[in-house]
Amino acid sequence: MTTAVRVIFVVLYVLLAPLIGALLAGIDRKISARMQRRIGPPVLQPLYDVIKLLKKQVIAVDRSQGFLIVSYMILTVITGCLFFAGVDVLMVFFILGTSSVFLYLAAVVTGSAMSSMGAQRELVQDMAIEPALLFSAVGFYLATGSFEVGSIIGGPVSAIVKMPGFFAAFLFVLTIKMRKSPFDTAQGTHAHQELVKGITTEMGAKNLAYFEITEWYETVLMMAVVAIYIINSHPASIIAAIVVILLVYFLEILIDNTCARLKWKDMLVLSWTVTLISAGVNLILLMVI
Amino acid sequence: MANVKRSPWILHYDGSSCNGCDIEVLASMTPVYDAERLGVENTGDPMQADIFLITGGINSQNASVVKQLYDQMPRPKVVVAVGICACTGGVFKDAYNILGGADTVIPVDIYVPGCAARPQSIIDGIIRARDLFQKRSEEHDALMKKKNLERRQA
Ligand code: SF4
């Protein structure tokens, strides 16, 4: 990739990712509603919500919360920018892990029991996600000989051909990352739960809006990771990647609507088992062959 | 685009209701009546709520709770009293522990009578509440603008 192309990708990500993320979230709510045989909110509902949140009075239990949330947002956006600039995927996954620490701090700084407990669950979720992400990065290196996004998508065959096990593990943790139902222990999008609003309990007005916007950036980043599994040097693979992304997204909605929440321990054990078995076996195969 | 009334989030609190009204409030959120099509979300969190839906009368124990929930909600906010108990105290009005309707402790904007209030009238109450929410939000915006201007001049 030339520098100009990288810059264009980064600018497009910064500008368009929140819109695409909001649209995906809106479609998610619409499809969920249809699955439950109801009309559901308009597709632009997530945007309306955020606009309203930005206009509301700010009541913050602790003043540093705003700073921490903004740091979380900026770090996540930077991670996405690095990814779209074609830098090392390993680094992208590491920085993504760092950004969630800021979210943890923003929740515990309030001292509220509900949000602290949600924050601790968020850390457990991160622990459940991290191995699969790191495995993915290693898998990309073994399959394509490089950590760089540019070389991963530049090969003659798609990465997924050599690493289906890694992809399966990645899909599994994607459900956790997207806060979908069996694993929405830290914060749930639908209805309220035993922890009120979990990690976002003490976030109102614009702080919650920043949280939502960050979620959108993150969704787009995660979908982009799905894409680099598929894209190869052939231009038609881009269309294939879009189709796969839509299928994956639909699968997440389906899982969200058909599963009940699990306990955090089950989540941890399940995600590590899946990661170890499916990514681990794939890893051994890649190293042996 | 800037219409805040498209996104009225609800905080539902059960005062000393007999649960009849609560079941109807929850019914209006379920697939059959689907209040979510209006953008309604049932948050359990006063920090994130715009509309305070209160059922049941106020008694000496929950008076302070109701007041606190109201204070924790960021402006602009609207209060809806659902069911005759929340409006006036209803059948429990003369009970020794009942102080009266929700308006004995917080300002109530919209009254939805009925015993129990039907989902249709609850949704009607929510629609009236979101129009009021829009109006309050505009007033709030104007006030903030004026304040910011004053701060800049000072
Ligand atoms: S109005 Fe009727 S149904 Fe509602 S809480 Fe009072 S007694 Fe129960």
Image (cartoon, rainbow, N blue to C red):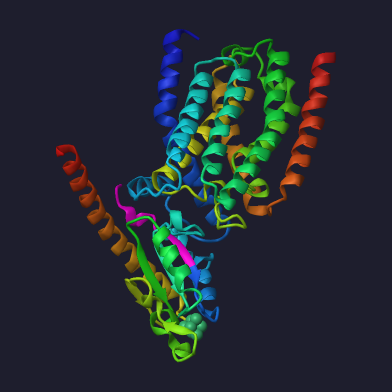
x 58%, y 33%: residue? A101
x 40%, y 58%: residue? B73
Image check: A162 left or right of A39?
A: right
The residue furthest left is B153
The residue furthest right is A288
x 49%, y 16%: residue? A85
The residue furthest bottom is B94
Residue A242 visible: no
x 64%, y 48%: residue? A185
User: Where's residue A286, x and y in %?
Assistant: 79, 17
Residue A213 drawn in magenta: no
**Snapshot quadrant of residue A100:** top right
The residue furthest top is A2
Residue B119 visible: yes
User: Where's residue A269, x and y in %?
Assistant: 78, 40
Residue B6 drawn in magenta: yes
Q: Nearer the viewer, residue A189 or A96?
A: A96
- Magenta range is B1-12
Q: Quadrant of the C terminus of chain B?
A: top left
